[in-house]
Amino acid sequence: MKLSVWYPGFLIFVPLVFLVSCSSPAQRIDDIAARNSLERRVIIGDTFRHIVYLKIAKPYSPRLHIYIEGDGSPWLFGRYIATDPTARRPLALELAKLDTENVLYLGRPCYMGLFEDAICAEKYWTSARYSPEVVASMSRAASNLVEELEVSKVTLIGYSGGGTLAMLMAADSSLTVAPYLDSVVTLAGNLDVTAWIQQHNYLPLTESLDPSLADYPDAIDFMHYIGADDENVSTEQALSFVAKHGGRYKILDSIDHSCCWLQHWPELLERDVNVMGSKVE
């Protein structure tokens, strides 16, 4: 198939293959996972289906690192709701493949090709992206895998909006992942949704929860990594959250919202994340 393109004085035909991506974002995630020996599964959460990728690098380790991706591309050109919100650059998956611990890449509802599921209204990647039903389903999906694998220690690791979901999963002790969860790590996490919306003059996420308004168990160890050059989630918002809710934080120089987390992640894993766990009273 060809698409005609008009320029003053002449008409040319451009093969459509050059104007569209050769593979979908979900397919690209599949490819990255396959190249790094992560097993793909489709599992049922509380309400939604979830695509997950699993790699058991240490069969005898009680620890599982669960990675949660950012919001992806819920909007096109800032005006139109995307048909498929899946991340074009899955940074959390790229982080997960550098991890030598047992890892689970936990897909969000309606992402990674599941947007055609009957339940997947567009609100679940726009106004309700952090809704109670999304959080509950993420937690149930994680718990199902944790119980199957018989691991007893869970670290949630969330990038950007994935950090929002990780914090919301940690906030509700009634959620099913709670008995196993002892540590949460956020990278460029959106921890104050209301302030973030005001900063960018975005539409309000009317059906979503806000981590800044939640309460957190004292037994969970929290670490928040902040990019000093991040213009999407400001340093001030992150520091305000820590001042209110506690937890540790580190501001990383020469890092913005997307660059250059991968270069620093192996060191951060070794120095900070791998030694996290239940707090010593």
Image (cartoon, helix red, strand yellow):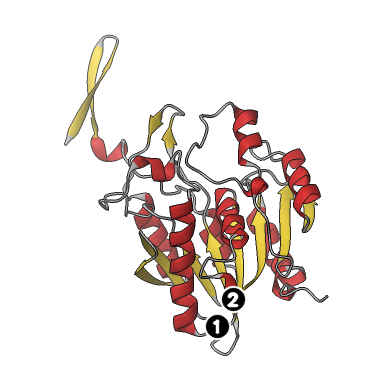
Dot 1 alpha-carbon crowd within 10 angstroms: few under 14, some 14 to 19, many 20 or more: some
Q: Residue 85's quadrant in the figure?
A: top left
- Note whether 109 is above or below 258 in the view shown: below
Quadrant where the C terminus lies? bottom right
> Depth check: 240 or 281 in front?
281
What residue do we see at 38% from left, 50% from top? 25
Q: Residue 61's quadrant in the figure?
A: bottom right
Identify the residue position indicated by label 1 in the image.
151
Decide which of tag 2 and tag 1 comes sooner along the chain: 1
Give residue 167's position: percent from left, percent from top: 62, 56
Which numbered disc, 2 or 1, marks the residue closer to the eye?
A: 2
- Note whether 48 is above or below 25 in the view shown: below
Q: Amino acid at mark 1?
A: Val
Dot 2 alpha-carbon crowd within 10 angstroms: few under 14, some 14 to 19, many 20 or more: some
Give residue 209's position: percent from left, percent from top: 55, 46
Please tell me whether mark 2 sits on a helix, a strand or a loop: helix
Name the side, left or right, on which 33 lies relative to 2: right
> Depth check: 91 or 249 in front?
249
Extreme residue toward the top, this view: 9
Tell me if label 2 and label 1 are in contact, CB under 8 Å. Answer: yes
Quadrant where the N terminus lies? top left
What residue do we see at 67% from left, 55% from top? 215
Q: Amino acid at mark 2?
A: Tyr
Please tell me whether mark 1 sits on a helix, a strand or a loop: loop
Identify the residue position indicated by label 2 in the image.
180
